[in-house]
Amino acid sequence: MEESEKKDKISEEESGKPPYVSGDDDEIDLYELVMVLVRRWKLILGIFVAALIVSAAVSLFLLKPLYKSSMLIKSNADAKSIAKQNIKAYREFQILTQYINAINSNLSSGSYVSISKQFGIPVNSVKYLSSLSVRQVKNSGLISVAIYVHKTKGLKSLADGIFKGINDSEYFKTISAKNKKYMLYKKALLIKELDKTDYMMNNIGMLIKDAGENGKLLLIYAHPKSFLEEYSALKSELNKINYDLKHRLYLPFSLVSKPYTPRMPFKPNKKLIVAVSGISALFLGIFLAFFLEFIEKNKNRHNNK
């Protein structure tokens, strides 16, 4: 019995395999895999905890919070004009996009003074601005202007400055001047027409009398009721012009809604960063555990030869 045990021991030593290994080398032993994780649990846990601490510190202290808000502006062109002049409406949106891209370029290069003059706001407020973006709202004259800032303080005054800067930009300022000039010209014509209609209404009797034999014919075409309808239509159109001038609808865009003040940052997502870092570290720790076990096992085999 002793001789057979010695022979088995010698054969095991010659084979270079440890006593617990049995079967083919390619066979996966689940128990052994679990034991590797048990033996290397400190390494895995250490990497996992370190990753959580580092990712939390980076997201809290190094990454700047970025807040997102948006305001809605609308084209002052009526819906029919937009439908008939799709190319013109698209061209104006392209000009607006180019203007916003120029602002983003100045932000990237640190030209805060230039932007401050365009918006009419302090330089310190501009420094909180990260970037801008615009998009059209489908099937409407609405445009969404997204504002990305590092601090929400003074966001509303910043938005007011951006909106003013859009309408006061070189291209849109020219359009505004043309629209206002046309409105004032149309207002002057309407006032003349109203004065003329008012005079005829007040002096219809005298006009018919002066017409002599043609007075009856004039009464048919110049009935007081027709004067009242024309006067009412002219008055309504004049009121609309006055309203548009008062509310500055000669500007290419009007403000529909101001941006809200966000409570939580848009970026970075601190919870997601920590979670992804923790999971990645866990997989890295497991990989290192098996890698070190593989190196150690091969080293033992080499020493036993």
Image (cartoon, grey):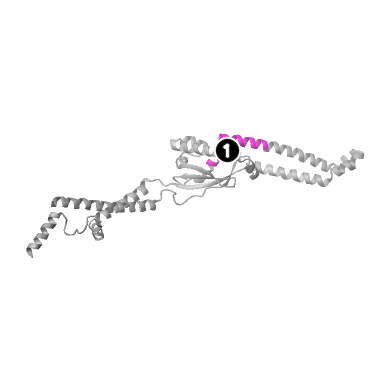
Q: Is residue 120 visible?
A: no
Residue 286 x/y as whole percent: 28, 54
Looking at the picture, which amino acid does disc 1 mark?
Arg
13 displayed left or right of 237:
left
Whether residue 67 is in magenta: the answer is no
Residue at 57% from the left image edge and 35% from the top image edge: 171
Instruction: Please name the predominant secondary structure of the magenta segment in the image.
Output: helix
Question: The magenta stretch spans which residues?
Answer: 162-182
Secondary structure beneath dot 1 equals helix
Residue at which label 1 appears: 91
The front one of 148 and 205 is: 148
84 shown above or below 290? above
Residue 28 x/y as whole percent: 25, 57
125 shown above or below 40? above
Q: Is residue 216 visible?
A: yes
39 displayed left or right of 173:
left
Residue 114 x/y as whole percent: 49, 34
